[in-house]
Amino acid sequence: MDFFELAQKRYSVRDFADTPVEAEKLEKILEAGRLAPTAKNSQSQKIFILQSEEALARIRATTKMTFNAPVVLLVCYDKKLSYKNLDETHYVNYDGGEVDATIITTTMMMEATELGLGTLWARGFDSQKIFDAFPEISGLEVVCLLDIGYPASGAMPFPRHTDRKPLSETTVRL
């Protein structure tokens, strides 16, 4: 499948089957994230793999945005390691950690799609509840959850999924 087919196939899954994700597939997804670019190759990401019954119960107690996925990646970054712009003439106080983590998440999401899995990039949660539930992430910045699993039979893209503005509305040629 070429990239455009892959991009068109991907949608936000909100109904996952009760089927485990194979270890080999999860490792490929994580490797895709590891290979993703980060500013100055800082690699400040820290990805927590929530897959055990105990970890999934903890995350599900904090948010409904897991949709019973068998794997949830809690994507964070370490501000001590992320790229900072030290040039005071451009982007003062810029921290590239969140952008890097989103690039990594997108790369993992597309790899999961390539492997026949569904995903949901979720940000609809109270970060403090997640910090309370997962003391392991103390000192990190929470970026998102990436739910991963097989779509349930009948899972469908959101009705507006294919709505896209024309390029003329989102690009400017100079």
Image (cartoon, rainbow, N blue to C red):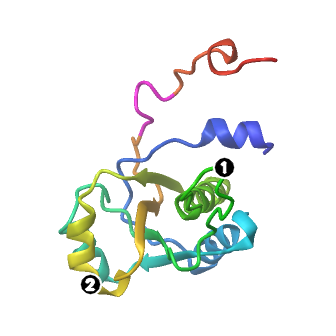
Residue nearest the viewer, comparing 130 with 149: 130
Choose top left, top right, bottom left or bottom right for residue 6.
top right
122 to the left or right of 101: left
Please identify the quadrant where the C terminus is shown: top right
Looking at the rendered structure, the kind of residue marked 1 is His
Instruction: Indicate whether residue 157 is drawn in magenta.
Output: yes
Q: In the image shown, does 41 or 67 lie closer to the viewer?
A: 41
Give the quarter of the figure containing the N terminus. top right
Is residue 36 something one can see in this rendering? no
Label 1 CA crowd tier, 10 Å (few <14, some 14–19, many 20+): few
Residue 162 location in percent, x, y? 54, 25
- Work out whether mark 2 precedes mark 1 in sequence or the reverse, and give the earlier one: 2
For mark 2, give the secondary structure: helix
Q: Residue at x 67, y 50 (%)?
A: 89
The residue segment tinted magenta is 156-161
Q: Name the residue under label 2.
A: 54
The residue carrying pointer 2 sits among few (fewer than 14), some (14 to 19) or many (20 or more) residues within 10 Å by Cα, namely: few
Question: 4 and 43: which one is in front?
Answer: 43
Residue 13 is tagged as none
The percent coordinates of residue 20 (x first, y second) are 45, 72
Compared with residue 54, is residue 35 higher up or lower down, i.e. above or below? above
> Which residue is label 1 attached to?
90
What SS does tag 1 mark?
A: loop
